[in-house]
Image: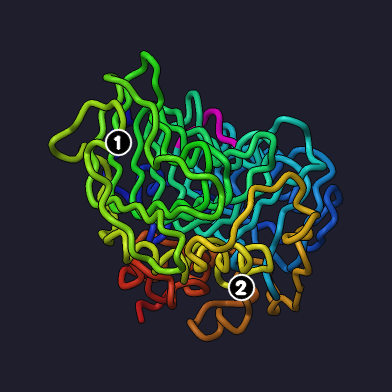
Amino acid sequence: MATPVAAQTLAFPTAEGFGRFATGGRGGAVYHVTTLTDTEAGSLRDAVSQPGRTIVFDVGGVIRLTSPLTIAENLHLAGQTAPGDGIVVYGDAVSFTNANNTVVRYLRFRMGHGGSPGKDAVTIAAGHDLIFDHVSVSWGQDENFSVTNEARNVTLQNSIVAQGLHPHSAGGLIQSEGGTSILRCLYIDNHTRNVKVKGVNQFINNVVYNWEAGAYIQGDSERKSQANVMDNYFIQGPGKASQPFTRGNANFSIYAQGNFQDSTRNGKLDGAPILPAGYGVVSWQATPFAYPATTALTAQQAYAYVVQHAGASRHRDAVDTRLLQELTSLGKLGQIIQDENEAPMRGPGEVQGGLAPLDTDQDGMPDAWEQRYGLNPRDATDRNHDADYDGYTNLEEYLQQLVVEGNGPGTTSRVSSPKGT
């Protein structure tokens, strides 16, 4: 089952779940993405082709993939560094298989109907220690976000998983014995598999909206499954109704508490607790499995949090804005789609760029920030120093300062400045 992990530095101060100790590009090189084109020097594809990097963005906008994108290991993809409205990766599948020790924050992965047939928008079929924070994933042709086979120690938190494309509109397969945490996420407009689970799973403080043929599907196989499913809100949209929990068998062990269902479609959040009979055929666990501690929210608090913070939320694009409008309609809006270019989505939309701050030594930290904290804007090596001895490099301190305000649960635990202030 899940691999034990010794106490160590978190990927970033608000990292939770099985993937919380991913090291990313800590101590490695910095790569600046300087173009939205797909294949040339300075592109995202070039950036993720080699391990051991922190990837920062000097451009904002839509990166249109011409083929599937494969991510190397030991990377930190810092989407929060992009100017303007941030980054959308659009047009084909993205594979994080064997991208060990990778951190991904504040990016949007939107595959689309023109991508490689039968692929997930984001897939992890093997590898260990990955964390995805404040990402938006949509328009997969198979699943949107899947963790399968030999993957272990994976977290998806504070994110949006939306609109898998019909005829196979599915949120994701979460089928790994190595531990997957899904925390404070929104699953919306996926016909089924929101999510489908086998193995070791935390599913806590999530909102599922407008499913049709399966929200939380409990894998009914000979494999043993052990899941903590706590304080989630399942809200019926305008699509045809089905129960939040389906399938399962005696091999599926579950600890469930605090889960709510709202099936009224009346524009109000007024659901009721899901009773034991609503969980299908399972083996009940009297106490939670001993999985990593997470921020404790009620289902009602989780809904409010997701509305405010889920996805690449520093600058919500038109797609996520529309999805949140659907959610907050509480039953009135929503649709399962086949083509993202049709109404009401109309493709990835306009994503504005902007000017990146001056970074003379190209170490990922702007000159003004380095000067503010007594670092040398002409010495690239100081990015990997740890001026306050807290386990985070100076570069990581900068990356966290970009997002620390208003980030919801856990923000009282934050990195300090390099000088400890």
Under circle 1, the secondary element is helix
Nearest the camera: 14 or 337?
Answer: 337
Percent coordinates x, y for residue 346 in the rendering: 78, 60
Q: Which residue is mark 1?
A: 279
Under circle 2, the secondary element is loop
Q: Residue type at mark 2: give it.
A: His
Nearest the camera: 222 or 409?
Answer: 222
Q: Tell me the chief SS of the magenta region.
A: strand
Left or right: 63 with respect to 293? right
Residue at image location 55% in from the left, 41% down from the top: 171
Left or right: 254 with respect to 39? left
Q: Report if residue 394 is visible in the image.
A: no
User: Which quadrant holds the C terminus?
Assistant: bottom left
Callout 2: few (<14), some (14-19), or many (20+) C-alpha neighbours within 10 Å?
Answer: some
Residue 28 belongs to the span the image colors magenta: no
Percent coordinates x, y for residue 306 in the rendering: 44, 64
Picture disc at residue 315: 2
Q: Residue type at mark 1: give it.
A: Tyr
Picture disc at residue 329: none
Residue 217 quadrant: top left
Q: Which residues are magenta?
A: 123-128
Residue 358 quadrant: bottom right
Nearest the camera: 315 or 5?
Answer: 315
Left or right: 104 with respect to 85? left
User: Which quadrant holds the N terminus?
Assistant: top left
Nearest the camera: 151 or 236?
Answer: 236
Q: Earlier in the sequence, mark 2 or mark 1?
A: 1
The CA distance from mark 2 to mark 1 is 37 Å
